[in-house]
Amino acid sequence: MPPTRDVWIFNHYADAPDRAAGTRHFDLGRGLVQRGFRVTIFAAGFSHATLQESRVSRRGMYRFATYDGVRFVWLRTLPYRGNTWRRFANMLSYSVMALVVQSRLSRPDAVIGSTVHPFAAAAGFIAARLRGARFFFEIRDLWPQTLIDMGVLQDGSFAARSMRWLEAVLVRRAEVVITLLPATREYLAQRGLPTEHVLYLPNGVRLGTRAATPPPARIAELLDRLKADGTFVYGYLGAHGRANHLDVVLDAAALLSQQADMSIHVVLIGDGPEKSHLMRRAGALGLKNLAFADPIPKDAVPGTLRRLDGAILHLADVDVFRFGISPNKLFDYLANEVPVLFACRSRNDPVADAGAGISLRPDDPPALALAMRTMVALPAAERRRMGSMGRRYVEQHHDIDLIAAQLADRLRGMISGGSSTAD
């Protein structure tokens, strides 16, 4: 048998399926473990969603835990609230703690350094250099371009220039650049950076016959009560942040509330920095056809989605999406055969490609309200067909096990001294 290879993944915001957060690296790690690798994920115990430390004891600095064969190293990081200097300190504290703890572990064969923020990826690069491992750089979000296009960061500022420099260093030093976005090669080429070692591995969904965990009792009761009254229920599962611009959903719900002949309800499930604002605004608008619910564990997502009639994906109209998107929530919707309203100006449109819903322009409440009414008016058989087409699309393009197999092949080739030319 070939020797077992050790792979480390540095992702500040990685999480296990027992919490309501992104599980991309857990899912990929699980697939790698099934293919004979040992996987360790370095992640912060402090939750970006709840702004609380929930993984590391009060007196501890780090903790090991294993989920389905994937080892996590939960790191204590500095707490923060809001986008102040404390959040920047939180990012740096993650990188410092990760580098301290990695020195106490046996040498890896390969290291994957992943954004969202580039300092986590930089920690992975430093660890790879210190330990003589192959380095893979994963671009999840385009920093600082995303922050610039959303108006959070000024182009040309010291912070923006520093992030561009760090991104360029990581791209040039990586043996493979993993990207979730279909047009990342174009982005890199525009910046004069190499593109021949880019490997496209989008987000995916864990498919299979495993029984779904029921939704939390409060959400189940709400959905059952609405469905019993014959209400058409749209759901949104995911972050409540600036990029999602869920104010548009509230405005669309306000327009729908004026349509006395249609019974439509929207349930927003999740958390994020904009949630308190959204709840206050919904109260001020007097919305009776919209409800909020707390985040749910990843294992409960399928059981919740299967109780919905439709799902909404809305992203703000910002230029950075011209390089494409790969939102986890969208593939969860499609995998669970829920017809989707897709409101995003992006390079790729998986909903249109799959024939799994209705696509429309973002930041347009009347257009979203019209799309919601249009979906309700469709024959039930047509909505079921959309759901089936979405499931088929995910099976072909976003099965996380197939994506893990591609990553395993590339890791084996690189660890064995193969070429870095990617797909």
Image (tube, rainbow, N blue to C red):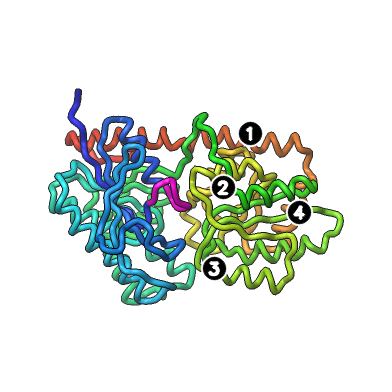
* Residue 95 picture location, percent across and down: 25, 61
Q: Secondary structure at mark 4?
A: strand
Range of residues picked out in magenta: 15-23
Residue at label 3?
274
Which residue shows up at 20% across the image and 58% down it?
A: 99
Q: Viewer-nearest of labels 2 and 3?
A: 3
Left or right of 169 on screen, residue 84: right
Is the stretch drawn in magenta largely helix, strand or loop? loop
The amino acid beneath tag 4 is Ile
Residue hosting label 4: 264
The quarter of the rendered structure image containing the C terminus is: top left
Q: Tell me the residue at 50%/57% (across/down).
A: 321
Q: Which label's residue is closer to the chain start, 4 or 2?
A: 4
On residue 349, which mark appears? 2
Closer to the chain start, of discs 2 and 1, is: 2
Residue at image coords 58%, 55%: 269
Horizontal and vertical percent position of residue 170 = 26, 56
Amino acid tagged 3: Glu
Q: Is residue 251 visible?
A: yes
